[in-house]
Amino acid sequence: MKEIPLAYVRSNQAGIVATLLIAIILQLPWLIVVLWIVQLLGLLLGPKANLFIAIVRPFVSKYTASGKTEAAELQRFNNSLGILFLTCSLLSFLLGWSAAGYVFAGMMGAAALGALFGYCIGCTIYFQYKQLRARRLSRG
């Protein structure tokens, strides 16, 4: 199974939180578009294409070789959920529903902040999905 260094995962989460805090506090929805692009590139092209990871790579590369990692499959799932929330946010802004746009963005920010503090809601959802899938496959 492919693994992603935890330092890279944390840098992405911190970048998400910082970007969304700035976007929400200063009411700059275009920053959410930038974040959506950063996350989409990371999903489509891999972690090396993620801007937040590229920024921290020179500073943490010596720690990544022997450090903790997280499963790439799980990170792809979490990244997909994040893009879903950002897409809902951007669609809300396009429809003129600014409050809903900021709520969706805030939900993603809260999830990333929670992950930084050690609780990954995306991981919980992923685990439940895998459990449901296993039960369905075992029934026949």
Image (cartoon, grey):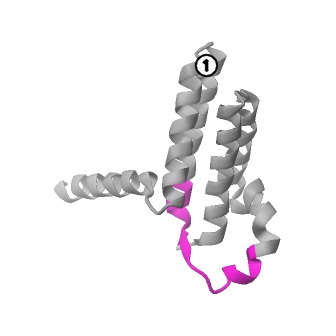
**134 vs 5: above or below:** above
Crowd band around label 1 with a 10 angstrom C-alpha radius: few (<14), some (14–19), many (20+): some
Residue 50 seen in the current view: no
Residue 55: x %, y % from top left: 80, 61
Secondary structure predominantly adopted by residues drawn in magenta: helix
Front-lying residue, 83 or 104: 104
Residue lying farthest to the top in this orientation: 96
Q: Is 76 colored magenta in this rendering?
A: yes
**50 vs 61: above or below:** above
Dividing the picture into quadrants, the one containing residue 57 is: bottom right
Badge 1 marks a residue whose secondary structure is helix
Residue 27: x %, y % from top left: 70, 27
Instruction: Read off the magenta span.
Output: 60-77
Residue lying farthest to the left in this orientation: 139
Residue at point 58% right, 28% down? 102
Circle 1: residue type: Ser
Q: Which residue is mark 1?
A: 98
Q: Is 120 colored magenta in this rendering?
A: no
Residue at point 27% right, 52% down? 132
Residue at point 61% right, 23% down? 91
Residue 124: x %, y % from top left: 37, 55
